[in-house]
Structures are given as C-alpha cells and as structure tokens.
Amino acid sequence: MLNGKEVTEVPRSLAAILPLLLPLFLAQTAVAQTSESSQPELLQSSLAVPGEPSPVLSVFDPYATAALFQPSSAFLTQTVPEEEVKWYQSTGFKRTIAPATLITIGLFTFKDEGFLNRQEVRDWRETFIPEFEDHTDDYTQFTSGLLALGLNAFGVKGTSKFWRATVTYAGGLGIMMVTIHSIKELTEVKRPDGSSNNSFPSGHTAASFASARFLDREYGHVSYLYSLAGYTMAAYTGVMRQLNNRHWETDVLVGAGIGMLSTDLAYVLMDNIFGDKGKNPPREPKPEGPRGNPSFLDYRLGYARQVSGLEDRGELFTAENGWQMGIEGAFFFNDYIGVGGELSVTGFPIDDSNFIPEDPVVIEVTEEINTQPFGNESLFIGPFFHLPLGERFGLNGKLTGGWSNGAQATINAQLKPEYQEEFGVAEVPIAVFDPKDTFGFAAGVAIRAMVSKRIGIRLFGEYNYSSPDYQISSLVSFDQEGNPEFGPVEEVVNVDFSYMAAGLSVSAVLW
C-alpha cells in the first residue's frame, strides 16, 4: 500500500523479457561487424577528397560527434579503412546506445520504492492533475512515420524510394508489435488506473519512437529539424501516456527503446533482403555554416532536497527527499548572454508517521493515515549565461523568477475494512492544504557536454525559492452523493518551500 492506493508488485518473471530484447541488440551488432551502412561510406568518401564540403549529418547520428570534433586537416583528409573499424565503432552498435540506455533506466525504475521508482511520476500526476484526460496520444504515435512517407510521396528525396520506405516502416512496426505484445503477455503488469494487466511496456510509446527513428533515418541528414520534430513528438506521446494514467514511467522508457531498436532492425533486414534496390543516391554534401549562438531547449529530471519549511513541521509531518522535472529554454543574443524561461514541477513525499488525528471517531475508523506528496510548480523567466569551454563543453548559468504555486494536498484516513463496507469508500480526506500563488525565483549553474553538433547533456544544480500560504480546512460532513464537505479555513500557514535540486538534462542546441 502506497499513499493509500494499492500498487502492483513488480513481477518476478521480469527476466523473461530478456530473450525478446537480446535479438534486437545482437542483430544490429552482428551486422555491424560485417558491413557498414551507406552513411559512413558517404562520410568516408567525402572526407577523402581535400577541399570537399562536409555532408550534413543527422542530429542524432552517432558519426556526427566524431566528425564535428575532428581537427580541420584530419576532417578533410582522413579515411577509415574498413578492416580497422571495430564492432564497437560501427554504426549498428552506436545506434543501440540510446535505446539501450532508455531500456536500462526503465528496468531500473521497475520498483515501487527507492531512488527513481515508477511511483514518482504517478504521484505527481495524482497531486497536480488527477482528473487529466487527453487522447491526442492515440494519433501522435504514428505522426512522424506518416510525415516521412508524406514527404517521400511529394517528392522530397530521403534515404529510400517510396516503396522501400513503406516496407521498412511497416517492418519496423511489425517487429515492434510482436515484441511489445509478447512482453505484455509474459509480464501481465497492471496499469496504474487498474483497468487491465497489460501495462508493460507501452505500445503507444514504442510506436511513436519507432516512427521518430524512421523519420530520423530517412530525413535527418536533410535537416536536423526533422529529427528534432520526430523525437519531440515521440516524447510528447510518452508523457501523455503517463498523464492519462495509462502507463508507468517504466513502461514508457522501455517502450521507447524497443521502438527505436525495432526500426533499426527493420533497416538491417531490408539491407539484407533488397541490398541497394530502392535506395536513393546520396545527397550532394552541403557545407555547414558557421556555428551560431548557443540557444537551446532541454528537458531535465533531478533530485530535490528541502532546505527549510517542509523539512520539519514538528508533530504534523516532515518532508522526505523529492524530485524535480521540467523544460527550459533560452534565446542567446551572442555567445554569452540570452533570455529564456523554465516550467518546472517538484514533488516531496511526506512522512506523516508522527501525525495523530485529534478526533476520536477518526481514530476509531482509521487503519492508517496517508498524506499526498506536497508539490510545487513554477513558471520563471530571466537572463541566461553561457561561457564556452572549448568546442565540446560550456558552463551555463541562470537567474529567473516569476509565478509559483503549490499543489493542493490532503491528509487521508484509510478506513478499516469493516468501515469501508459501511461507508462505501476506502479512504476519507480529513484535512486539506490549499496553497495560494506566490512569487518565486531560481538561481542555477550547469555544465554542458555536446555529444553531437546539436545534442548536449547537462549536469545541473540550482536553488529554488518560494514561500506560499496554505489554507487548512478540515472535514465536517458528506453531502447526499457522498462527497466530503469541509469547514471554513481554520488556519493559514506560510511554508518556506525552498529546495536544492541537482540532476541531468538533455539539450537540443539550436545554433
């Protein structure tokens, strides 16, 4: 039991999915040991001719990093003999790194307690938007794939001709569906809304990342914006599956990895079946323009720790360590100064073991007390700063401020079984904490390392301040429909919600 809600035990048969995942990794690695894809050949041939402009590489292509940070002389003249390409240097292996990382993190979160557990995002959802419902994710799962086929049909030349692109996309979706549904049958994980036992992994998310990977491989070399749009749509689909209470965080992360691997495996199969039939000639290489200002958009996730206020409320409750997630972006006027904003949410699980209700009736009917996590959301704007540290690294800073608001929280009494039957409910809210809007600010620093020309990883740390007033009301009765009714505000408590946060973020750098 967690926060008064029954949770599904992590299945002991989780290891049964490994035989289904391993072929997705091994197939690409085996092929990578025997041959290289057309893009590395294009890269080698163009680099071999002094003075030729470099090709435009996909924003997510594993060769982009190596090409970007080559010395200029080596960039124009160096060739990589085929016999010297090790399996871990091959395109196939490098393409498995991102999906393998997603699957690994997803499996790590397959637990209900401890660091990075699958309950944390659901707790945030139940705290801030418990009634949220939106079905656009039913359509966005295929948007990127249909965009790629549409561009092809209207004459925008990608990697493949239309018939081969269609067969490849259908093959990737087929591999994905067989893998996803086989794992669902093996694990039988209950959905967070309790509607069925086929939650793990997320099919919608797998389809959306399979589609994004397809768009990236067909048109990412044409413009990085295609890749960015595809993966953004895929991430949106995964987030919506969680906000709709249809999937756990674990389901989404593992589904994303499976979707990307499925599309990559489809390309491997098409190469072995059709060879070069249906492939378009390589695009004429275009010179990259000079690097622009370091404007960026990123998604972050980190650990948060209270430094005052909720850290100790005496006999009422204490705050545990929490989490922070959000999006952040800035437009830079030059290499050093810009302006931007951030939208972040934070949650802190509450330890209410010291809380004892004053009403003897509540004590009599209560099995245990559960307090919703205290949450906070902020929308800040302000100046951003950047200090270049060579070609690959940079130091970022920010000083932002603006609107901040806490989420309504309740103290719930989990009723004893005999009283659940009598009252017809499993739990009753006995007190409500209703926050008011307030001003807040944040100051932070981050170190960014570029992993390709336009994708970076940031290690960030920040201090976030807000001090909202909470109005406290207690349960007085129930209406005719059984809904709780609360009395007038009994007390207004000012809570210092200041916290420190640290974590990782993924940045799309738009220079």
Image (cartoon, rainbow, N blue to C red):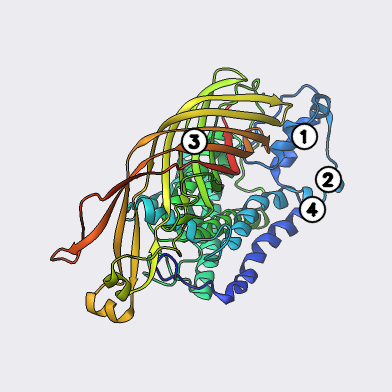
Pointer 2 residue = 82
Nearer-the-camera pick, 413 or 8: 413
Question: Residue at position x 54%, y 70% from top?
Answer: 183
Front: mark 1 or 4? 4
Q: Look at the image and tell me in which quarter the C terminus lies.
A: top right
At mark 1, the secondary structure is: helix
Asked if labels 2 and 4 touch by Cβ distance under 8 angstroms, the answer is no
Is 136 placed left or right of 203 in the picture? left
Is 406 placed left or right of 87 in the picture? left
Asked if labels 4 and 1 touch by Cβ distance under 8 angstroms, the answer is no
Front: mark 3 or 1? 1
Q: CA distance from mark 3 to mark 1?
A: 26 Å
Q: Earlier in the sequence, mark 2 or mark 3?
A: 2
Asked if labels 1 and 2 touch by Cβ distance under 8 angstroms, the answer is no
Q: Earlier in the sequence, mark 2 or mark 1?
A: 1
Pointer 1 residue = 45
Front: mark 4 or 2? 4
Front: mark 3 or 4? 4
Within 10 Å of the Cα at label 3, are there few (<14), some (14-19), or many (20+) other Cα atoms?
Answer: few
Q: CA distance from mark 2 to mark 3?
A: 34 Å
Q: Amino acid at mark 3?
A: Gly
x, y percentage for residue 71?
81, 27
Pointer 4 residue = 87
Pointer 3 residue = 155
Q: Earlier in the sequence, mark 4 or mark 2?
A: 2
Asked if labels 3 and 2 touch by Cβ distance under 8 angstroms, the answer is no
The answer to whether residue 159 of the structure is visible from this angle is: no
Q: Amino acid at mark 2?
A: Glu
Question: Residue at position x 35%, y 60% from top?
Answer: 411
Residue at the extreme left of the image, as rendered: 480
Q: CA distance from mark 4 to mark 2?
A: 11 Å
